[in-house]
Amino acid sequence: MSEKTFVRDSSGKVTHVRETAEDGRRSYLYEVDDSVSGALLNDFKGKCVEVADHHPDGTTDAYEPDLGIAGTFLNDQKGRHK
């Protein structure tokens, strides 16, 4: 099971949802979807905006998401490096 956290801006407004794998090695950052359907059907997750690999040394490599068929099977859902 993954861990879901809410990312807030400086005023405290929730702007994104981060879902981190149980092992902590990969996370996905989504725009928040606080509509009724987003809350009920997608657990507040809107469009995916980042895929990140977290390394044991504390560093992170972030990528634009590539969630298409080719990106999923060939590039592990990672697009261009940020």
Image (cartoon, rainbow, N blue to C red):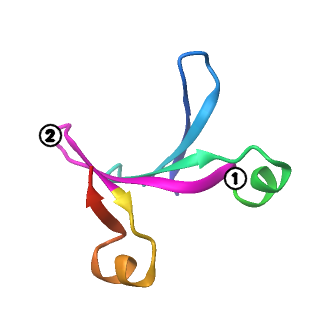
Q: Is residue 68 visible?
A: yes
Magenta range is: 43-63
The residue at the point 31 percent across, 72 percent down is 76
Q: Secondary structure at mark 2?
A: loop
Name which of mark 2 and mark 1 comes first in the sequence. 1
The residue at the point 37 percent across, 69 percent down is 77
Image coordinates for residue 8, horizontal then vertical, percent: 56, 27
Q: Secondary structure at mark 1?
A: loop
Question: In which quadrant of the rendered view does residue 74 lie?
Answer: bottom left
- Name the side, left or right, on which 14 lies relative to 66: right
Residue at the farthest top position: 11
Q: Nearer the viewer, residue 25 or 38?
A: 38
Residue that carries the numbered disc 2 in the rendered image: 57
> Which circle marks residue 27 in the picture?
none
- Name the side, left or right, on which 14 lies relative to 59: right
* Neighbour tally class for label 1: few under 14, some 14-19, many 20 plus, Cα within 10 Å: some
Query: Taking 75 as reference, is 11 above or below it?
Result: above
Query: Taking 75 as reference, is 57 above or below it?
Result: above
The residue at the point 56 percent across, 40 percent down is 16
Residue 53 on the magenta segment? yes
Image coordinates for residue 43, horizontal then vertical, percent: 69, 52
Disc 1 marks a residue whose amino acid type is: Asp
Disc 2 marks a residue whose amino acid type is: Asp
Q: Nearer the viewer, residue 60 or 63?
A: 63
Image coordinates for residue 47, horizontal then vertical, percent: 58, 56
Give the label, 2 or 1, closer to the camera.
Answer: 1
Residue that carries the numbered disc 1 in the rendered image: 43
Q: Do the numbered discs 2 and 1 sit on residues whose CB atoms are within 8 Å?
A: no
Image coordinates for residue 53, horizontal then vertical, percent: 28, 53
- Name the side, left or right, on which 8 lies relative to 77: right
